[in-house]
Image (cartoon, rainbow, N blue to C red):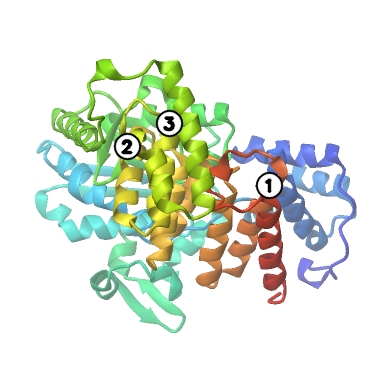
Amino acid sequence: MPVSCITARPSPELTQAQLDLFRGLIEERVGVYFPDSRRDALRRALAARITRCGATDWDDYARLLACPKRGEVEFRRLLRHVVISETDFFRIPAHFEALRRVLLPAMVADRAREVLNIWSAACSTGEEPYSIAMTLADMGVALRGARLHLLATDVNADVIERARRGCYGERAVRRVPPEYLTRYFRRSSSGYEVSPNLRRRVAFQEFNLAHPGYPCPPPAGWDIVFCRNVVMYFRPQTTRQVLARFRQVLRSGGFLVLSPTERLTSAGDDFETIEAAGAFIYVKPPLDRSLLSLQRARAAEHIQARPRAASARSSRPSRAASRESEQEACARALADIAAERWDQAERALAPCADESWAARSHLLLAWLRALRGNCDDAAAMCLGLLAQDPLLAPAHYILGLIAARAGDLDQGLEHFGRAIYADPGLVPAHYHLGIAHHSLGDFAAARRAFRGALRALDDGRDPWLDFSEGLTPGLWRRACEERLASLAVRD
């Protein structure tokens, strides 16, 4: 009987042992790990498949997945539910500005280079490699004597096939500049199609990053590897293996582009870090001198931009006394913020201009200024803090609020997402991520965000209360539950 003719039925109960078996199988095959916090998502994905594949129980489903041919087909179908294939054209615009203004000029300056080798290592439905191809075409790389080898890979064969077709709806192309839309797309009955000339510039193939044997173009390797929003789903040991393999196949001085929410601390000294056009880019040593100069200049700018104490260093109190007074100042400021006594809160935090004070004090001052509507000052403070620590979750959260309240919901989504990756317990970031998705009409994503806020509340951690706007955890929970109830009406 064809699978499509099988009547859906309730899925059998899934024990913890069976869940662990499937969790291990997925990690073994594609590297994606489901921690306990995401086991409900895995349960839902498995339940969605067993009701449609004809398996009688979970043991039968496990046997099906173990079959050489039928099991491979079913595992690919399961991947649609467990691997998120969500992307956009020109997602994280700073990366494409860095590509245009720094990375490509550095590569084409090498006159001996005949081919530019770029790998989009988790291309999903193709938006990323096509964005790279448009950026290259717009710069006229071919006119500078260099040919392009652009490879795009993904573990999911279905999304690779969609990427090859290059067909996208109206919403998918919302970030494409109008001139690119005219130049590199053509209208179709369902939306837009990538032009044949641009499609020919990208080679698509299926590839699993969890397996060794990474492609390596001769003679030296890849100039740039894009691998964004992928390693966050791996265990640390898998991430280390993936980064080590990227390093092997990158040429000396080659660039690795990760999502802003993904750390590279596990790579140790294997990569240098530069800031280019507002993005952090990782470089396989040795670092080109011009890029090293850029890195130092950026660092100097951030140091000069940081507020300094007016008094002499010798007049500072002892470190222990400073910590005590800082904690007291933060407590007073939080009480004043909750009561909307803005001037008193500002006075309490005034000493945090002393650079010896911790990030918490500076974040509270940025938060206070954002609440008061001094968004430029607040954003400048957050950017300065992120220059020192790119994974400072509250700074991303504050920038997300500033962007969302200014009407730039896409930028808000980016910052809320970075905040949540850096600190999954930051309840307000989950909540406002849900608000932004709801405003954009993505109700499924909004539900996921509000549920994420509830999970964070269940964890019981409380550092996020600095940014609670005076609301108790109980009130945050009620707000999330009310949002979910209103969204349920749309189902």
- Pointer 3 and pointer 2: residues touching (CB < 8 Å)? no
Residue that label 3 marks: 264
Q: Residues within 10 Å of mark 2 (few under 14, many from 20)?
A: some
Mark nearer the viewer, 3 or 2 = 2
**Helix, strand or loop under label 1:** helix
The quarter holding residue 346 reads top left
Which tag, 1 or 2, sits closer to the chain's start? 2
Which tag, 3 or 2, sits closer to the chain's start? 3
Q: Residues within 10 Å of mark 3 (few under 14, many from 20)?
A: some
At label 3, which amino acid type do we have? Leu
**Residue 387: mark in rendering:** 2
| Res. 260 visible in picture | no
Q: Is residue 136 left or right of 157 when viewed as pictured?
A: left
Q: Is residue 3 left or right of 241 when viewed as pictured?
A: right
Mark nearer the viewer, 1 or 2 = 1
Residue 94 location, x and y as percent? 30, 51
Residue that label 1 marks: 457
* Residue at 42% over, 50% down: 368
